[in-house]
Image (spheres, coloured by chain):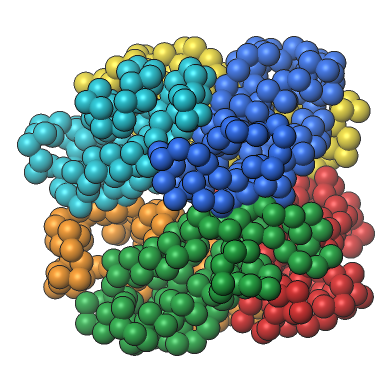
Chain colours: A yellow, B blue, C red, D cyan, E orange, F green
Amino acid sequence: MFSITVREHLMIAHSFRGEVFGPAQRLHGATFLVDATFRRAELDDDNIVVDIGLATRELGDLVGELNYRNLDDEDAFKGINTSTEYLAKVIADRLADRVHAGALGEGARGLSGISVTLHESHIAWASYERAL
Amino acid sequence: MFSITVREHLMIAHSFRGEVFGPAQRLHGATFLVDATFRRAELDDDNIVVDIGLATRELGDLVGELNYRNLDDEDAFKGINTSTEYLAKVIADRLADRVHAGALGEGARGLSGISVTLHESHIAWASYERAL
Amino acid sequence: MFSITVREHLMIAHSFRGEVFGPAQRLHGATFLVDATFRRAELDDDNIVVDIGLATRELGDLVGELNYRNLDDEDAFKGINTSTEYLAKVIADRLADRVHAGALGEGARGLSGISVTLHESHIAWASYERAL
Amino acid sequence: MFSITVREHLMIAHSFRGEVFGPAQRLHGATFLVDATFRRAELDDDNIVVDIGLATRELGDLVGELNYRNLDDEDAFKGINTSTEYLAKVIADRLADRVHAGALGEGARGLSGISVTLHESHIAWASYERAL
Amino acid sequence: MFSITVREHLMIAHSFRGEVFGPAQRLHGATFLVDATFRRAELDDDNIVVDIGLATRELGDLVGELNYRNLDDEDAFKGINTSTEYLAKVIADRLADRVHAGALGEGARGLSGISVTLHESHIAWASYERAL
Amino acid sequence: MFSITVREHLMIAHSFRGEVFGPAQRLHGATFLVDATFRRAELDDDNIVVDIGLATRELGDLVGELNYRNLDDEDAFKGINTSTEYLAKVIADRLADRVHAGALGEGARGLSGISVTLHESHIAWASYERAL
C-alpha cells in the first residue's frame, strides 16, 4: 500500500458548547496543521499516488474556504461543535468530493482512501480516515 | 475511523540485560515523548472522540507513576527489559484499564482502540496498538 | 552565556485592523507555541539558570490569563493589533515583571535577559528579546 | 501489534519525465528523511521488536548505496520516475530482502511487516507498507 | 529587539569540489528548508516587523529562482561551492536587495537586519546573518 | 556572520541535589538532543564554516564519552549537578579543546565561537555560548 501526504494550515476562531469543553466554551481560536494523506494499492503510470501539484492546489483551495474565519458564524457549522476530529472529517469528505469530481486528475480515481490529521498544538492532534 | 492523540513525556533511568543491547546494558536513561491515541468509529454526542481534558489528566497521572525513576528498582519491572516497545505496551494497557474503570468518562466506553508511541530520540521510536 | 527555554501554548481568537493584514482582518484565531528563554552569564549555586519548575509555573499562569479568549474583547488590547510579534513582547514583559517581583525565586534576580518566541504555524514565528 | 522505527537520511539528484511533474522535470534534488518501521505481533525473548543496532546498521548501509548520487545515472532506475513513493518501496523491498537473508538477526524472522516513509520536505512525504 | 521568520523550501542538485567534501563531490541534491528572519528595534505603525504577506511572497519568488535546478549549471554559481552556509548568504543578500528596492513595502526600510537559516537535513543546518 | 550546526544525541542517567529539583532528585534519566553550532565571520577557501564531516565525527566521539552512562558515577561530575545548562557548557568546552588541538582541521582555527543547545524534551532546552 502506497500513500502521499501534503501539509497545509488553517487559522480559525470558534467556541464549543458542552461542559466537557471547560474554558474552550469561550470564543477562542486555533492554528490547525492539516495533513491530507492519499492512499492506493499500486502506483499510476507516472509512478505516483496522485499529482502532488493538484493535491496541494485542491487542499489549499479547500482550506482557503475555512481560513481566517469564525466558524461559529459559518452556515455549514451552525449548532455544531467544530472539534478537531470533526473538522478532520469535514476536510476529508470535501477532498473526497473533489477526487470524485475529477479535480485531482483522472489518475486520482484509482485512490482507495483518504485520511486527514489536524494538529491543534504540539501536544494534541486528531485524525479521520475513510475509503474512497 | 476517528482518533485523537495527546502527548506527554517521561524521564527515566534503566539498563538492559542481553548482548544485543551493547552499551545500553549499562545504567543510562531516556526522555520518552509519549503519544497516546484513542480511536472510535463514530463521534460521541459532544462531537468528540473522548474528553481531551480527562485523557490528558489520566495520561499525565499514569506517566507520573513512572516519571523521575530508575525502572530497574521498580517492582513492576523486576527482571524485565524495559525496552521502548515494552513500555509503550505498559502505558497502553494501563490507559485501557482506566478507560474500563470509567476514568476517561462514560463516553470513553465507546472507544474501540488505543495506541501508544514512545519516541526515545529524534531518530528512534516504538509503538504498541491494541483493541479496547 | 547560558540560557534555558520552556515551551507552553496558547489558543486565542483575534482580528487585525489595516489593509496590510488582508483576510486576517476578519475574526480568526491561532495556536501560539510560546517559547520563553531566560539568560544569564553564570549559573547559580544549584548549577542552573533558573528554577525550571517556577519558570514553567509562572509562564503557564501568565499564558492562562490570555488562553481561550478573544483578544479583541480584552481591555488590555483595545484598539491594538495583537500581532504575533506584539504578543511576544507582552509575554516577555509580563515575565520580566514576575522575575522582578521574585516569583521565579531569589536566584532569578541574576538573570540578564528574556526572549519570547511565538510560533503561529509551522512556517511563521516571531520573537521579542529584552534585558532584565 | 508492536513496531519500532529508525530514521536515516539521503541526499540525491534526479529528474522526472511527464508533464504532471512540471518544473520537477528539470534535474534537481532532495533530502529524504527515511523512516523504516518494523512490525510484529509479539516481542522476542529480549523483549524487543528487532535488534535496533542491526536495523540501524542495515538501513544506513542500504541508504548508503543511494546516497550522494544522481539517480538518473543509476542502472537500477533507468527509465523510471524515482518519485518519493517509488523510492519508499525500493527501500522497503531492499530491507525485506535483508531481513529474509538474516542480516537483521534470527529474531527478525518473526517480523510481520515493514513500512518506509520518505519525507521530501516539511510539507510532503510518502509511504509504502508491505508484509514480510 | 523584534523579529519575524517565515519558512520556504527549495529542492536543488549540485556537487562540490575539494577533498573535504568526500562523497558529496558527486552530483547529488538537497531539500533546503529556508527560514528568513527580519529584525528591527521597534514595531511599525501597524504593530508589525514587516508585512508578512510581502515577506512570504518575495521569499517565495526568490527561492523560485533557484528551485528545481542543478546549481552546477547556473551562471551565478560557476566555479563556486554552493555549500549550505554559502546559499544562506546568497538568499539573505538577495532578500536585502529586495528590501532596499522597496519590494517588502515602505515600512520594511525600518528593518535593521536579516538572517537566513537553511536546514539541509534533520541533523544539519547553516545560517548567515547580516545588517541592512 | 556564518554558522553551521550539527545534531547528535545522548542517553544518560543522573540525579540532582537540592530542593529546587523536586522529584528530579531521584535517579532518573534523559535523552539529550545535542546541537553544536560553529561560527565564523568569513567562509574558508572551500566556502564552508568548518569540515562538517570532522565536526560530526568529533561531536559524535565526544558525546560517546558520556553516552549510556550514569553521570553520578563519573569522576568528572562528582558532587556536581549535571543540569542541562551545565552539560551544554561541558560539551561546548570539550569541543573548543578539540578545535584548539586541530581535530576539526586547520581551517577550524578560523572559528570565532561555539554554542551548544541540549534539548531535554519537546518543551525544555538549554544553551551555552562561548568564544573560541
Q: Horizontal placement of E18 versus F13: left or right?
A: left
Quarter holding residue B91: top right
In this orientation, does residue E77 appear? Answer: no
In this orientation, does residue B120 appear? Answer: yes
Residue E21, percent across and down? 20, 66
Q: Image height check: is D116 above or below C120?
A: above
Residue C4, percent across and down? 67, 68
Q: Residue at x 47, y 12 (%)?
A: A132
Which of A37/B87 is in front?
B87
Q: Horizontal placement of E79 versus B126: left or right?
A: left
Which of A104/C63 is in front?
C63
**How many marks can you see?**
0
- Quadrant that contains the N terminus of chain E: bottom right
Quarter holding residue B53: top right
Quarter holding residue D100: top left
Q: Horizontal placement of D52 versus C34: left or right?
A: left
Q: Residue at x 45, y 65 (%)?
A: F65
Q: Image height check: is E93 above or below D20?
A: below
Q: Horizontal placement of E108 versus E130: left or right?
A: right
Residue A126, percent across and down? 64, 29
Which of E59/F119 is in front?
F119
Q: Residue at x 15, y 72 (%)?
A: E18
Which of E90/C15 is in front?
E90
Residue B9, percent across and down? 67, 45
Q: Residue at x 67, y 47 (%)?
A: B70
